Image (cartoon, rainbow, N blue to C red):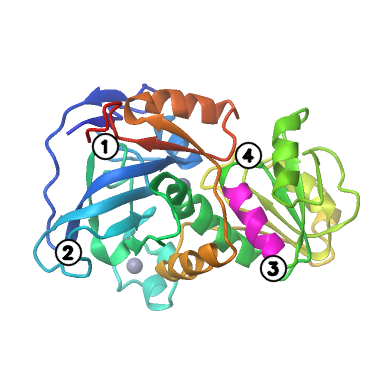
Amino acid sequence: MRAMILEAPGRPLRAAGPATPRPGPGQVLLRVLACGVCRTDLHVADGELPDPKLPLVLGHEIVGVVEDGGPETGRFAPGSRVGVPWLGWTCGTCTFCERGLENLCDRARFTGYRLDGGYAEYAVADERFCFPIPGEYGDAEAAPLLCAGLIGYRALRAAGDAARLGIYGFGAAAHIVAQVARHEGRRVFAFTRAGDAAAQAFARSLGAVWSGAADEPPPEPLDAAIIFAPVGALVPIALRSVTKGGTVVCAGIHMSDIPAFPYDLLWGERVVRSVANLTREDGTRFLALAPRIPVRTAVEIFPLEQANDALDRLRAGRITGAAVLTPLSPSGRT
Ligand SMILES: [Zn+2]
Ligand SMILES: [Zn+2]
């Protein structure tokens, strides 16, 4: 099959032709239709997350069609269109799994990090962790729902019932969360890199009532803020913008160091917390909700072999919405 392979962190992905994977017990073999490019892929490729499987196929927003199943499968008929998220496997027996916090499982395995992912023509996945894809969405449009959408949704829940919601970093996750937040009657304030007029206009087009630079104060206090940008300096900035009792949610898997800040910023029962991974329940709930809103995803589609270009553009902040890879060759052959 064709695949883009990470051989070592810090190196560009290499176009390669590894053997098509065979589904093991509990796994389905998927022909990949589309795979989203997430900021986490950048963190893995750049060596900011420890101990990735190597060599590795990145990609944890996989939309694929079931071609075959290994032993002990049968949840999906061949031909079913399913999605594979970041959470690829959990133990089911640790204290976190037993408490319904499988996102924190001690032995969790993650797609496109400790398991091969979807920057390829084929992938295998544990069928228990796959989701049916709502029929309303095209393949590429559905891909960003699987991480940007799911983890964004979990971050929004962590923000509580905030009526005035700040979002720092207006990329793939934010553009989905803004639509959900607006649907829930919240007012969204979008913060982008200074001078990024295109991102600020994009945020307003998705219902943000205000958009501006991340270091600007919002026009009124916020009840909560979600930080999607991997920039620790935003934590005290966001705390300064939220009112008493407000929560600042750090929604990325990696962030630069958070600078010291005066206790005053936290006083008044403000909360700083992270959101880690997802549970299958998050996925089921969000994928039921998304078509009812309906959430629309803005995608920029790249051929599989241009994965490095997509990653570079994401790193530079030059993607509007979400980048998605498709293994379709120009002739339409897969
Ligand atoms: Zn992701
Ligand atoms: Zn566990």
Percent x, y of residue 249: 65, 56
Q: CA distance from mark 1 to mark 2?
A: 21 Å
Q: Which amino acid type is marked by label 1?
A: Ala
**Residue 120, disc:** 1
Label 3–label 1 contact, CB within 8 A:
no
The first of marks 1 and 2 along the sequence is 2
Label 4–label 3 contact, CB within 8 A:
no
| Image depth: mark 2 or mark 3 in front | 3
* Residue sitting nearer the eye, 334 or 164: 334
Percent x, y of residue 61: 40, 48
The residue at 13%/53% (across/down) is 23
Q: CA distance from mark 2 to mark 3?
A: 37 Å
Q: Which residue is mark 3?
A: 184
- Disc 1 crowd rating (10 Å Cα; few below 14, some 14-19, many 20+) is many
Percent x, y of residue 203: 71, 44
Q: CA distance from mark 3 to mark 1?
A: 37 Å
Q: Which residue is mark 4?
A: 257
| Image depth: mark 4 or mark 1 in front | 1
Q: Which residue is mark 2?
A: 26
Query: In what quadrant of the picture does the C terminus appear?
Result: top left
Dot 2 falls on a residue whose secondary structure is: loop
Q: CA distance from mark 4 to mark 1?
A: 34 Å
Q: CA distance from mark 4 to mark 3?
A: 33 Å
Q: CA distance from mark 2 to mark 4?
A: 40 Å
The first of marks 4 and 1 along the sequence is 1
Magenta residues, start to end: 173-184
Judge whether residue 175 is colored magenta.
yes
